[in-house]
Amino acid sequence: MLRYLTAGESHGPGLVTIVEGLPAGVPVDLEAINRDLRRRQGGYGRGGRQRIEQDTVRPLAGLRHGRTLGSPVAFLIENRDWVNWQEVMSPVPVAEPTDPRAAAKVVTRPRPGHADLSGVLKYGHRDARNVLERASARETAARVAAGSLAHQFLRQFGIRVVGYVVAIGPVEADPARYAELPLEELAERAEVSPVRCPDPEASARMVAAIDEARAAGDSLGGIIEVVAVGLPPGLGSHVHYDRKLDAALAHDLLSVQAMKGVEFGLGFAAARRRGSEVHDPIAWDPDRGYWRTRNHAGGIEGGMTTGMPLVVRVAQKPIATLYRPLPTVELFTHAPADARVERSDVCAVPAGAVICEAVVAFTLARFFLEKFGGDSLQETRRNYEGYLAQLREF
């Protein structure tokens, strides 16, 4: 089974990613992973932390001469800001702190919308920093490394995954400006946009909305769309709840910090239409085999891929840290206070698009390997090609 594990705190020495289950022989381009890490750090509305960090992966295990060995792959992403936090975040006891900031870094004013208060209550901490350091979206750098690696595996089979922004705050992109574009052109448009939106007119209005929020000491969320093409029919299963691909994608996407909603295809709009306006008619021709004449289902029916493009949208809430903070309560004294202000972004939705892209890629790779298996890339390819030959017999 393909899986990954991350470890590390936002201001600790670094983040670690361990990916287990990739077959041997998969070519790995480390610079491509580093490009995805840089993409995650970009986007209009990001804060000062991104000017400090220059995320790159250092391979620790599982690779030799640019290919996977079949053993766990481990990456380290070092935190450059660690040099300024070595005493505050020291893994070992500090007998007599010399850093005058140490006391100031204790967090006793939990932020509304963050994990601060619930984490303190659950784990019995006296300092919310013990919670916020791991709850921080800094952890997503490790997820992007894992997802970028998975995407390289999927590309061996012609599968491509692209994430982009379709709304920030009240500003929505017009699908008529990009929905019919080839995926590569859509991706290129998103990459040149400061907010990773393929609609240039909406992109400009999104930038203005972020500027307004910044001036007000506020933050903005948005909506991300991820599309995957080249998927064969039959990934996932209808037979049990935890084998349904859409359920797994929803779980994995909602596990990303600040993600609050997921929909596929028409999503919630399907609830307001008649069945004849929702379901996708089936057709067949000698070259394509079975296909749908439209894709309102977003490429998934009965928990399984249909062979049509996978289309999933994710709602990302605004960042919880506000420069004009909301009211809170001081821990232990219960006195009214303003919430703690940590260095933060005004809008992280463009970064969220890269993160969701990586999460979708990893989940798809997991289900791909669940179906086709293989201890080596050659074996996986043989199994996959045999399945495609079987499909042509129907």
Image (cartoon, rainbow, N blue to C red):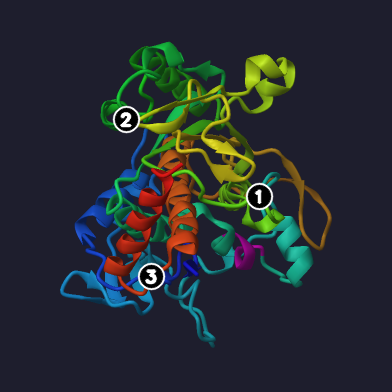
Measured in 3D between alpha carbons, the distance from the residue under mark 3 to the one under mark 2, in whole angstroms, is 29 Å
* Residue type pointed to by label 2: Leu
Taking depth in this image into account, of 252 and 183 the one nearest to the observer is 183
* N-term mark: 1 or 2: 2
Q: Residue at x 46, y 30 (%)?
A: 291
The span shown in magenta is 128-132
According to the picture, the residue beneath numbered tag 1 turns out to be: 238
Mark 2: few, some, or many residues within 10 Å (few <14, many ≥20)? some
Measured in 3D between alpha carbons, the distance from the residue under mark 1 to the one under mark 2, in whole angstroms, is 29 Å
Measured in 3D between alpha carbons, the distance from the residue under mark 3 to the one under mark 1, in whole angstroms, is 23 Å
The image position of residue 388, as x and y in percent, is 37, 49
According to the picture, the residue beneath numbered tag 2 turns out to be: 183
Q: Residue at x 38, y 19 (%)?
A: 203
Which quadrant would residue 143 be assigned to in this image?
bottom left
Q: Which mark is residue 374?
A: 3
Q: Would you say the residues marked 3 and 2 are in contact, meaning their CB atoms lie under 8 Å apart?
A: no
Instruction: Give the structural element (helix, strand or loop) at label 1.
Output: loop
